[in-house]
Image (cartoon, grey):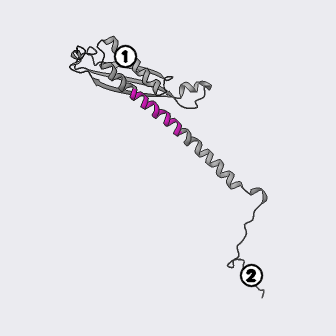
Amino acid sequence: MRRSRRSSDRPGRRARPHRTGNERGSASLEFLGAALLLMLPIVYLVLALAELQAATFAAEGAARHAARVAVRQGEASDIHLSANAAVELVLDDFGRSDDERTVVVDCGGARCGMPGTRLRVTVELEVRLPFAPPVLGLDRVLVVPVEASALQPVSRWASMEGER
C-alpha cells in the first residue's frame, strides 16, 4: 500500500496561483478601461443637463423680467419693444445671448397695457447640446427647445400712476 502525499492545505501555507508573465497588471488596465467607458457618458449627461438647467433659469428670468417691465409701459408698441429689450438684457447677463430666441407678448385679446388686463410674456430658447459636432448637421439636430412664460397683471391704477 502506498502512502498518500502530504496535503498542501496545511495551515500557514498558501497555494500560489499560477501566473504568467504577460498577465501582470491587466486588472488595473481593465478597470481603467471600464471606468472610462462608464464615466464618459455620465460626465456628458451631467454637462448636458447643466446646460439645459442654465437655459431654463435664463428663460424663466427673462420672461419674468420682461413681463414686469412691459406692464409699466403705456403704449402697445412700447410694450413689445421694452419686453424684447428686457429679454435681451437678461439673457446677456446669463451668458445666453448667442441662443436663438423667440419672445411672444400676449395681452389675452384685450388692448395691451389697459388697466386690469393680464400680460403674458413667453420666451423660447433653442439650446445646443455641448460638444455637438458640425459634421452632417448634428449641431442643428442636437438642439433642445426651452420655454418659459410669465403672467403679470396690469395695475388697475396704471393710468393714474403716470400722472403723479
Q: Earlier in the sequence, mark 1 or mark 2?
A: 2
Badge 2 density bin: few <14, some 14–19, many ≥20, Cα 10 Å: few
| Left or right of 15, for residue 38 | left
Residue type of the residue flagged with mark 2:
Arg
Question: What residue does disc 1 label?
Answer: 82
Q: Nearer the viewer, residue 24 or 92?
A: 92
Q: Nearer the viewer, residue 74 or 9?
A: 74
For the N terminus, give its image quadrant.
bottom right
At 44% from the left edge and 20% from the top edge, which residue is drawn?
88
At 72% from the left edge and 56% from the top edge, which residue is drawn?
25
Considering every residue shown, the one lying at the far bottom of the view is: 1
For the C terminus, give its image quadrant.
top left
At 65% from the left edge and 48% from the top edge, which residue is drawn?
33
Looking at the rendered structure, the secondary structure element under dot 1 is helix
Is 28 located above or below residue 76 in the figure?
A: below
Residue type of the residue flagged with mark 1:
Ser
Indicate yes or no whether the magenta region holds residue 46.
yes
Tell me if I can see residue 105 in this picture.
yes
Tell me if I can see residue 147 in this picture.
no
Looking at the rendered structure, the secondary structure element under dot 2 is loop
Q: Nearer the viewer, residue 126 or 156?
A: 156
Give how far across and how far down residue 147 sits, in percent: 41, 27
Is 53 located above or below residue 39 in the figure?
A: above
Question: What residue does disc 2 label?
Answer: 6
Give how far across and how far down residue 145 sits, in percent: 45, 27
Give how far across and how far down residue 14 sits, in percent: 70, 73
Magenta residues?
45-61
Q: Nearer the viewer, mark 1 or mark 2?
A: 1
- The quarter of the picture where residue 72 lies is top left
Considering every residue shown, the one lying at the far front of the view is: 164
